[in-house]
Image (cartoon, helix red, strand yellow):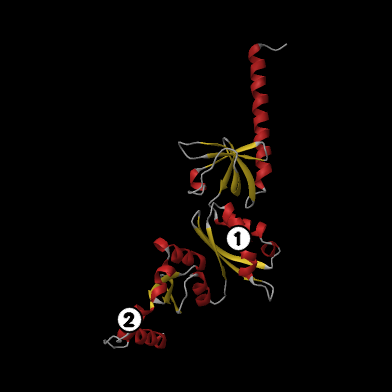
């Protein structure tokens, strides 16, 4: 009994309400998954923008932007990967689901999945510093006496941590032991470099740790393009100034009014240890 215009209007209203109901369903399905990791399948890759369309739950297609992807990772249609749900919110164009492969909490969730001691709370992850696709550092501590937190995370022959490395496209992961003592924690964070001494200084412009390392360990402590020192600083929350033992000794000599430098490297190192 309705005319063509009325019927068309009714059709548009019904379709609009259906679309709104679908959007609400998508929002409700993912709103409670913020902070979790999901398994997704790559449906397509936009070569121009680098954005990737992912399929979740075999029915929801979500766009993951290039900045949320691991740079060195080459994704292809059909690949399966783990993604971290950063945020879910409503917009005028429907629900927006932000997925990430670069978020530091992706590493946290992967460690919880892969390492039973972390999942059960026997080992606690205190902090994480990450440069996606390159290298990460995770500080862990045992909540139960007698448990080796680093060994639990690494696993026998490194199997546990290697599974996480494979999931993150070969990203190197350093697991270090957390300590309530800031100097010990900073020394651990600079692993694999060996640290001779850590001098802490808290000023109005921030907290600075001067770290003395053997001369031969300087490049290892700093890392490629400063990566090791940079990650250690993020992990600990301290600004880290790394100095070789010989330079520290010369500074110490001059600070107490001795301008004559020691004759040999051995004298220099002994003097540095004595003064520090």
Q: Is residue 204 visible?
A: no
Query: Marks 2 and 1, how far apart in space?
Result: 41 Å
Tag 1 or tag 2, which sits nearer the N-term?
1
Q: Secondary structure at mark 2?
A: helix
Percent coordinates x, y for residue 233 in the rendering: 47, 67
The number of numbered badges drawn on the structure is 2
| Identity of the residue drawn at 67% across and 16% down | 7
Which quadrant of the structure image shows residue 255? bottom left
Q: Nearer the viewer, residue 267 or 274?
A: 267
| Identity of the residue drawn at 41% across and 77% down | 214
Q: Is residue 173 left or right of residue 111?
A: left
Q: Which mark is residue 172?
A: none
| Identity of the residue drawn at 51% across and 43% down | 65
Which quadrant of the structure image shows residue 139? bottom right
Image: 3 above or below 39:
above
Q: Which residue is mark 1?
A: 161
Nearer the observer, disc 2 or disc 1?
1
Percent coordinates x, y for residue 29 in the rendering: 68, 42
Q: Which residue is mark 2?
A: 251
Q: Nearer the viewer, residue 64 or 163?
A: 163
Q: Secondary structure at mark 1?
A: helix
Percent coordinates x, y for residue 72 in the rendering: 48, 49
Quadrant (top left/top right/bottom left/bottom right) for the N terminus:
top right
Image: 95 above or below 200:
above
Which quadrant of the structure image shows residue 76? top right
Instruction: Return the residue found at the far front.
Output: 157
């Amino acid at each position: 009994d309705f005319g063509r215009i009325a019927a068309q209007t009714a059709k548009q209203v019904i379709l609009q309400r259906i679309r709104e109901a679908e959007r609400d369903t998508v929002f409700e399905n993912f709103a409670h998954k913020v902070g979790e990791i999901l398994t997704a399948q790559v449906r397509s890759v936009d070569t121009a923008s680098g954005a990737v369309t992912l399929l979740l739950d075999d029915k929801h297609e979500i766009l993951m932007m290039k900045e949320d992807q691991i740079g060195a990772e080459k994704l292809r249609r059909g690949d399966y990967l783990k993604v971290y749900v950063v945020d879910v919110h409503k917009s005028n164009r429907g629900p927006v689901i932000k997925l990430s492969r670069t978020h530091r909490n992706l590493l946290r969730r992967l460690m919880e999945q892969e390492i039973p001691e972390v999942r059960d709370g026997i080992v606690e992850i205190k902090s994480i510093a990450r440069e996606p696709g390159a290298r990460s550092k995770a500080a862990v501590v045992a909540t139960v006496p007698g448990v080796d937190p680093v060994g639990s995370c690494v696993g026998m022959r490194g199997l546990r941590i290697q599974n996480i490395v494979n999931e993150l496209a070969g990203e190197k992961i350093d697991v270090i032991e957390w300590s309530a003592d800031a100097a010990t924690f900073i020394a651990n964070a600079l692993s694999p470099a060996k640290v001779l001494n850590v001098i802490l200084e808290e000023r109005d412009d921030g907290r600075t740790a001067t770290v003395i390392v053997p001369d031969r360990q300087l490049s290892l402590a700093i890392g490629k393009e400063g990566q090791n020192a940079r990650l250690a600083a993020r992990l600990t929350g301290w600004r880290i100034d790394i100095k070789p033992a010989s330079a520290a000794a010369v500074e110490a000599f001059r600070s107490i009014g001795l301008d004559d430098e020691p004759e040999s490297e051995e004298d220099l190192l002994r003097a540095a240890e004595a003064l520090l």
